[in-house]
Amino acid sequence: MTMLHTVNKSPFERNTLASCLGHAKSGSAILLIEDGVFAAVKGTAHEDTVRGAVADHKVFVLGPDLLARGMRPEQVIEGISVVDYGGFVDLTEQHDKVQAWV
Amino acid sequence: MSEPWEEEGPGTIKKFMYVNRKAPYGTIYALESLEVVLIAAAFEQDVSMAFLDDGVYQLKKGQDTQGIGMKNFSPTYRALEGYDVEKLYVEAESLAERGLSEDDLLVPVEVMGREALAELMDEQDVILSF
């Protein structure tokens, strides 16, 4: 079974991302959305954690949520793929289950 | 004939601080804070706004909300000056944790350390948290 995890909370405000990473099996996909996109940006206090996640998981970030918050795709940590809403739909279709870490 | 509220004179001016700790768009707090500040500006109090924790993201330059179908309210921060809301304080530690600097902000602010901000909070008559 393949799982898609979505994370919609800022890593600075909640432990949602940490909890997701603690439970996501190796090779599963993680999509950062809404305030979760702050984790994808280079230069934050969470960068090392997220780089570790990229080594073990397929990590995606929702582009429109990044742009809304004033962040550009170039600022995203290497190895994270920026997707649009169509990409979000594709990810849900490609995986057997979605687990939303809200 | 003057209105009753005009007869009371200027009254006591209190120090009001609006403390902003949430990122924009993910929740309604940031927008609600702005709305309250703009309404309260009519009461001619000594108003300041503090931005700390994820609240510093509210002032990030270059917000483009077309893709999420929400109103980009970030230009409103530049209009605050016109309502005599000129004291905007941003916590240095919060910026640093997020890889941000003063240059990333869309409006002139005073960046200060956590301790100085704590002092400032202590001096307020009223603190409103968002």
Image (cartoon, grey):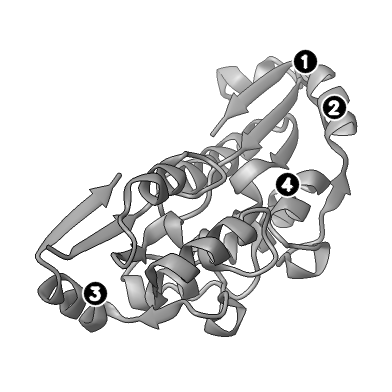
Is residue B49 positioned above or below A40 on the image? Answer: above
- Mark found first going from the N terminus, 4 or 1: 1
Q: Residue B12 shows which numbered tag?
A: 1
- In the foreground, B21 or B42: B21
Protein chain holding label 1: B
Count up the numbered dots: 4
Give percent across and percent down for residue B124: 78, 20
Per the image, label 1 sits on a secondary structure element best described as: loop
Is residue B129 positioned above or below A95 on the image? Answer: above
Quadrant placement of the C terminus of chain A: top left
* Mark in the foreground, 3 or 2: 3
In whole angstroms, how far apart are the C-alphas of marks 1 and 3? 54 Å
* Mark in the foreground, 4 or 1: 4
* Mark in the foreground, 4 or 2: 4
What kind of residue is marked 3? Phe
Protein chain holding label 2: B
What kind of residue is marked 4? Ser
* Mark in the foreground, 1 or 3: 3
Per the image, label 4 sits on a secondary structure element best described as: helix
In whole angstroms, how far apart are the C-alphas of marks 3 and 2? 44 Å
Q: Is residue B94 visible?
A: yes
Determine which residue is flagged by label 4. Answer: B94
Residue placed at 14% from the left, 76% from the top? A94
Q: Is residue A78 left or right of residue B107?
A: left
Give percent across and percent down for residue A4: 23, 63
Residues marked 3 and 2, same chain: no
What kind of residue is marked 1? Thr
Circles 1 and 3, Cβ within 8 Å, touching? The answer is: no
